[in-house]
Amino acid sequence: MLDSFLNSCADSALNALGQELANESLKAFSTNNGNIPKWQKAIEYIDSFEKSDLSYHAPYINIQSESDNYRQLENSFKQLIPWRKGPYQIGNIVIDSEWSGNLKWDRVFPHIRPLKNKIVLDVGAGNGYFTFLMALSGANLVIGLEPFLLFNYQFQAIRCMIRKPPNAYVLPLRLEQAPDISAFDTIFSMGVLYHQRDHMLHLHKLKKMLKKDGELILETLVIEDDKVDELIPNDRYARMRNVWRIPSISIICSWIEEAGFSSTKLVDINQTSVNEQRATPWIGENAKSLADFLDSEDQNFTVEGYPAPKRATFICRN
Ligand SMILES: C[S@@+](CC[C@H](N)C(=O)[O-])C[C@H]1O[C@@H](n2cnc3c(N)ncnc32)[C@H](O)[C@@H]1O
């Protein structure tokens, strides 16, 4: 996949960026992780199946498959559990992921500039569900950055079923590992900011990588409480360990301005529903999801007593 990635970066100003990202990715893929042989074996098996075209039939990212052997194919995709992001449909197999990603896409997509012929960065790409959707929307090249290795293998498992894979790649890197090259027309940072210990570092970095007059789509947790500027969880938030701070709308707008973006528009606020994030067999037996992380008597609060997750989407211009 990295060869194909380098080819996609070869004929443009992306050459230096591509080379550096590929070098860092090679290092990340060669880390010592005991699960890699199992994941690689699953992908080798998936790769032996006939390839087909990629499309989007909401809610599914879809790949036709005529295989009679689909139970074994399904077992191979199950070797890569938990599937957080999706859903995907490959032939008869429905990968019913924890998140119904189409709902987020429906909230965000109507507000963004067309992606046709654009160079796009998808920060915190997970297994590439949105990365594929960006490519299917006509982007010339989409680079997803996702440090969690399993999600990279999930992306590759899907990608190797596609007859002519689009110029869309998920690389095993954190945003901070990318060089400061302003190469992107559009950058998505969705569901990532509250996981950053230093939120301003994240915003400054996004700004540096965006072209002049480019567009940043920032989707993140917020609190809607006039009396509080930000929520800094004591320990966990909705059972998540790595949520550092959740700002109010006015505070996040001041962060965006401080990072130097020229304009910001709030286009959506949505309280995450237990239809959008829920336990399915594809995250493992008895695995928990949002319904278990909310107060059983009042779903407007988390089990820790904080306001339940609300996500806002901002469109920021460079
Ligand atoms: C909550 S998920 C959001 C996934 C997807 N963007 C979405 O909106 O559904 C956040 C993802 O960002 C990744 N992530 C966290 N910090 C990151 C960073 N500094 N650079 C790139 N990815 C990061 C995590 O590994 C995780 O998969």
Image: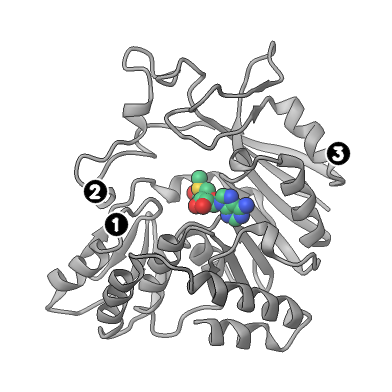
Q: Earlier in the sequence, mark 2 or mark 1?
A: 1
Q: Residue at x 20, y 67 (%)?
A: 74
Q: Residue at x 65, y 63 (%)?
A: 121
Q: Position of residue 227 (x, y in %)?
A: 69, 10
Q: Position of residue 234 (x, y in %)?
A: 55, 21
- Front tag of 1 and 3: 1
Looking at the image, residue 255 lies above or below residue 283:
above
Q: Position of residue 284 (x, y in %)?
A: 24, 48
Q: Are marks 2 and 1 in contact (CB under 8 Å)?
A: yes
Q: Going by the image, does 182 lie left or right of 240?
A: right
**Which of 96/147 is in front?**
147
The three-letter amino acid code for the residue at tag 3 is: Glu
Near mark 3 (Cα within 10 A), the count class, few <14, some 14-19 or many ≥20, is: few
The three-letter amino acid code for the residue at tag 1 is: Ile
Looking at the image, residue 267 lies above or below residue 35:
above
Q: Are marks 2 and 3 in contact (CB under 8 Å)?
A: no
Looking at the image, residue 123 lies above or below residue 39:
above
Near mark 1 (Cα within 10 A), the count class, few <14, some 14-19 or many ≥20, is: some
Q: Kindly identify which residue carries mark 1.
A: 81
Q: Earlier in the sequence, mark 1 or mark 3?
A: 1
Q: Kindly identify which residue carries mark 2.
A: 284
The three-letter amino acid code for the residue at tag 2 is: Gly
Query: How far is the residue under mark 2 from the one under mark 1?
Result: 7 Å
Q: Kindly identify which residue carries mark 3.
A: 258
**Which of 197/307 is in front?**
197
**Which of 240/224 is in front?**
240
Q: Earlier in the sequence, mark 2 or mark 3?
A: 3
**Quadrant of residue 92 in the image?**
bottom left
Query: How far is the residue under mark 2 from the one under mark 3?
Result: 42 Å
As helix, strand or loop, the secondary structure at mark 3 comes to: helix
As helix, strand or loop, the secondary structure at mark 2 comes to: loop
